[in-house]
Structure formats: C-alpha cells, structure tokens
Image (cartoon, coloured by chain):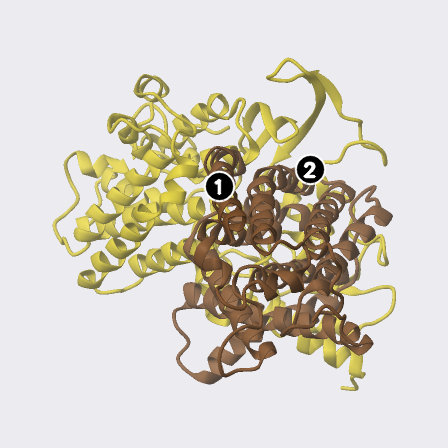
Chain colours: A yellow, B brown
Amino acid sequence: MDLTPLVRLRRAALRRPAVLVAAGPGATRVRLAVERELPRRGWPTAHGPADADLLVVAGDPGTGHAEWAAGVWDAMGAPRARVAVGAAERVADALDEAHRALLAACRATGGGHPTVERRPQEPGRGSDLTAHRRRSPGAGPQHGRTGHEEHTGHGTSGVAGAAMAERADDRDGLRLDRLHLPLGPMLPDWPAGLVLRLALQGDVIQRAAVETPPPSAHHTRPAYWDEPWLRALRGETVSRGAAARRLCAAHLDSLGRLLAVAGWGDAAARARSVRDAALTDTPAAELPPLVDALARRVRRSWVLRRSTAGLGVLTGARAVAAGATGPAQTATEDGHGDVYGRLLAWLAGAERASAESADARPLDGPAARTGPRGALDGPCPPSRALLDLLPALLDGAEFAGARLIVASLDPDLDGLVTSAAGSADGTEVRGG
Amino acid sequence: MADPGPLWSAALLPALLITAAAATAGLDAVLTAGAARGRAGTVRETASRAAAPVREVVRLLVRQPRRTTAMDVTLLRIGVVLLPTTAVLAAAVLPLGFRAVGDPDIGVVWFNALEALAWAAVWLTGWASNSALALIGGYRFLAQGLAYELPHMFALTTAALGAGSLRVGGVVDAQAGLWFVVWMPVAFVVYLVSAMAMAFWGPFDQPVGRDVSGGAGAELSGADRVLFFGGRWLLLVVAAAVGVPLFLGGGHGPWLPGWAWVLVKTAAVLAVLVRVRHLVPAVRMDRYTEIAWLVLTPLTVLQALVVAVVVLGR
C-alpha cells in the first residue's frame, strides 16, 4: 500500500474518530451498548453532523428513522463512514468495521471523496457487511448541505428555496418573526424517535406539537425499559432483583440525559457509568453505595436546583387527568411537580431499587405492574400520557427550559408500541 | 515600568498563549475522561488523555469543509477569526512580570473593550451559520453579556480605583505592598465569575451548550471549528491571566522572578476555572441575570464604595 504523507496524517488523525449515534425507535439496547463501548475506546462523541466522522445508525427501519439518518449522513463532511447496527452484541465489531471503512475513505484525495455506505438492514441481524463505495454527492466546498436543516432540527429561513419567517404576536404583545422548526429526532440527549414541531420566536416556544413515528412492523420486541414487568404480566417468572436493576438503570439513564441537557457533563457521565454498573453483573452489594454517592452529589448542587426548580410545573390534577402514573405523577404528590421534583423522584426511585437488586423473590403485587415510567396495565402506555402532557408544558417556555422539561419527562417511544394489553403477541397497542 | 516590551515580544505572545491554552485544554481533557472512564491508571494513559485536544485539532484540520444552506460565509469567517484575534489583542496589555507588549494609559479599558468584541464574534458566527440552533446560541451569548457585564465592569473599576490608574502596569505597581484581592475580595470573586462568562466557559457555556448541539459553533467544521473553539480557549487563558495583574499582585512575590510569579498565579487561576466546569452545572441565563443585577451589582458597587473611601482617606 503506497501512502502519501497527507494520507498518513489523515489516518493518524482519525485513529479516534468522533461518533454520532443516531438511535431510533427500538434501539435502546444498542444505544446502551454503544454508549458503553465509546468511552472504553476513548472515541469522542459528536454533538452533531458538523464534527462527526462516523455515523452509527441504530433502530428499526420502517419508522421513518432511516430517512432522518440519511439526512444526517448528507450533512456530514468527508471523510466519513456509517454503519447500521441491529444487535447490541455486534456493536464492537460494527465500530471496528466502520473505522476501517473510514480509514479507507481517507486514502482517496482530491475532489471526489469516496465514502463507504452501509445500508440499514433487518433488526437483530447485526451490522451489514456488504459495504460498497460510492462517490459522495456534491463533493467539494458545497458538500453535505442538503437536508441537514430539516433533519437535525437546524431550520433555515430566508433564501435558497426556504420560506422567510412569518410574523406573529409574541407573548409580550409585540409582532416578531416566527420560525417553524422541527426539533429532533436526532439531537444529543433527546428521547429516541421524538419529533416536536415548534413555532419559535427568538428562543421562546409559542406552540409545540408532538409527532411520533409510525409503529414499525418489525417492532415486535417489548420495550427495553419495560421488559421485566411486561414479562411478569404475561405470566413469566421475573425476579424482583432483576426488575429493580432495570428500574434503577432506567431512572439513571433518564437522569444522565437531564444532567447532560442541564450542562453538567461530569455528573451525566457518572450517572451513565452507574447505570451501566446496574445493567452488568456488578455485585448487588456494590450497587447501593454507587447510586447513593451519585444521588448525594446531584442533590447537593444548589445551581442545579436553582436552574430547574419552578420549571415545567405539573399539577397533580393535570397529571391524573392525562393518566400519568410514574415518577412524573409521584413528583406532584410531594409538592414539587417541576423539573427538579421529577429529578428527585428518579433519584429516590433509583436508590430504592438499588437496595433491592439482590431480591430473588418473584415479582408480584402492584410492583409487578409498574415500570420505570408508570403503570403498564393502565388504559394507555405511561409514555403516551407523558407525551400528551408535553405541549401544554412547553407553551411559552424558553428553549433551554424546554429541553429541560422534555428531558425531565423523558418519554420512551418504544413504550408506545408495546404495552401490557397487546404485547403478548407483539402487536402494537397505540402509536402516534 | 511603563515602557512597552521589545518588538519580538509581540511575536512571542500568540505562541505563549497557544501553549497555555493547550495545557489548559489538556488538564480539562484529563478531568473529562476521568469522569467518563474513571481515573487513569498509568502516567502513559494520563498523557494520552491530555493529548486529546491536540488530536482533536489534527482531526478537524484534515476534514473537508462543509457548509449549511445559505450560510453567510463572509460573516462566518469574520466571526470565527475575530474570536482568537480578540483574545490575542486583549493579551497585549498583559504584563509578563512587569513588562507587557504594550502598556497604554487606558489598558484596563482596552481589555474590557476587546472582550466586548468577543460578543460580536460569537453572535456573527451564530447568525452566519443560518441554522436555528446556532442562532439561539448567538442570542444566548448576548443575553449572557447583558447579565455579566455590569458587575464585571464594577469589578474592573474597583481595581483601577484602588490603584488610581487605568494603566495595567499602574495597577500592578499599586500592589507592591498588599494584593488587591485582600481588600477587594468581592470584586475578585465577581471577576472570576465573569471571566468564565466572557469565555462562555463552565457554568456559562450555554451559548455553545449541548442542549443546542453546540450552539453558536454547531455548524462549524474543520479549520473554522479549530479557530472558534481555539479562540475560546485563548479567551479563557487571557481572562484568567488578566485577573493576576488586577487582583493578585502581578509579578510581585518573594524568591521567584516576576515572570515566574505571573505564570504560577495564572496557572492557579486557570486550574480553579477548569475545575469549576466539572463541579457546577450550567447556569440558565434568565436565572443568572436576576442574581447578577439584584445581588452582584449592588455588592460590587458597595465594594467600589469601600475602596473609594479608603483611597480618599489615604
């Protein structure tokens, strides 16, 4: 292999590529595996397509996810590579393959940077091995500009074919430009698959509408976070310890997102590493001290309390009317009902669950029907209630506040597809 | 001490600042990796983690440039280049020991004016990207400027008042006996807070926050990204370094030569600022404005009053 010094430099520079994870519906298990694997390799995670080298697409095809992912791919500059992962066990191999493809993509110089494309395939089959080369569209300085705005929530206004922003009355009675912006589904620390249609004035949200992906025909597995309870409801024997571990990890996953959105990267990273400890075979006795230390650190932060308290207040009556049953509803009972209250409810839930992680008794009673986000035997999936609550809470919120409110409810879109009533045979109960 | 430094010092200044910025970024990378992966086991591993920013720069430089639809390339270039330029120009009044590249009579005002130019840099970058999240990032920095600038200016004024001079060299001379931090602690703490805010660093990084996918810098790639985020590191270094002549006695100190004291003190301030980022979550500007205007501004005015009375009584 004859390498020029420039190519050599490029390959050396890409030894640790920045990875953008596009996790769609049904990909929680894969996302968790990727999030565990990246820090282990010391590969940085990208904020968005602008600084990403590798795109990892995880999720069920047929939910519109693939089109969104293609938009993100178009927005990435060369050299780049992408890989679709369908099974958590295949993550390490898939990353290796994509990395090899990326290094190969470096070899070509000049205007047309060849890139390696991997097509998404059926879930559960691992990553696609049939990589093929193609010329990247529009290579050169204008490379990778199309579709980006629409697909990652970066909207345009003005020229180049896009409509100008219209005007509308703002909350203070002024007439200001209004921008229509889709938010999601591929923002960092965002519920997988969720799309919010926003009308923005400046960074104030005037109106928000929730858009959820259509349920996929492929999507037959129970939602990852609800799995132990769904299995128990189907009559299988699930130990309380296993359910407690999953509950603890689910709350810590949500917490990690909220802390990341709140701009506290260190605590978010800690929450995620404790989450991974709960999901792997860490001895049950070692789990509670880890969770307690994290909870103490988070509760001690005055700045966190100050910037999240009083935000997205949900009254008990509204929570009940919408059918919310999980931490979002318990937070209203304790008198908070705001973003900070929901955060405290997760911490308390995670602490309780971590103490029960050694319990080998079978899951039964009311606990057997209540997953991380609420009752699974109710009239609608718990995440549906959370989504129904979202638009009213977001009206008039500022962008930073809105991101915190979404993260504090953390609806799990996988949970919409499968719930107790219909999951026995894997059929969808209620979609978007 | 008022005479400016030799011409070659102007050429040396950017190199010195870049070295300091790389070292600071290395420290930050070690702390970040520690939070995600646990403590480094070996010295080799620590060094590898500290080299992450350098790797990042090389990685970005080999990438192909990319553009968003209808991006205003001219404005973007201006914004992206303005940020590091601002930082280096602001550093011109920094005395390394007792001599700066230039020591004008209005050195403190010079620093303050250039720091406000950074607002323009970030706003232009956010605006020119023609992307909603970048625009929101740009807005946020303007709101941040409104919030932090008032107490910040009172803190600067207090130091100038104590010395009876707007010349940075003059402020250092006035601290030959007693460092200003001893009798102006409030002004010093407020200065440190606003140093983070002006470099949109740590709890004040919302203009480039993760919740807006990198905000003002969201659409930058390649060399643009290196200049913009590198410029931020330079700004952080300069903001920390200016605190040394203003409050920590500049080159004054026993045993060591003046320049060594300046380096040691600057490193200490930088270490504190880097650590704060890992300990404190982001401050939302709508909440911080309240604190800045209702608590910090009165406190700094009170501090300035105390200093004024002391100066008059001397």
The residue marked by circle 1 belongs to what chain? A
x and y percentages locating residue A52 in the rendered image: 65, 59
Residue in the picture at 84% in, 58% down: A139
Nearer to the camera, B237 or B215: B237
Residue B132: which disc? 2
What residue occupies the far bottom of the structure in this picture? A2
- Can you identify the residue that label 1 sits on? A191
Q: In the rendered view, does B214 fall on the left or right side of B100?
A: left
Q: Amino acid at mark 1?
A: Pro
In the displayed structure, A253 sits above or below B241; it is above
Q: In the rendered view, does A202 fall on the left or right side of A44?
A: right
Q: Amino acid at mark 2?
A: Ala
Residue A1 in which image quadrant: bottom right
Residue in the picture at 78% in, 72% down: B10
The residue marked by circle 2 belongs to what chain? B
Q: In the rendered view, does A90 fall on the left or right side of B41?
A: right
In the displayed structure, B43 sits above or below A28; it is below
Residue in the picture at 14% in, 36% down: A365
x and y percentages locating residue B193 in the rendered image: 51, 50
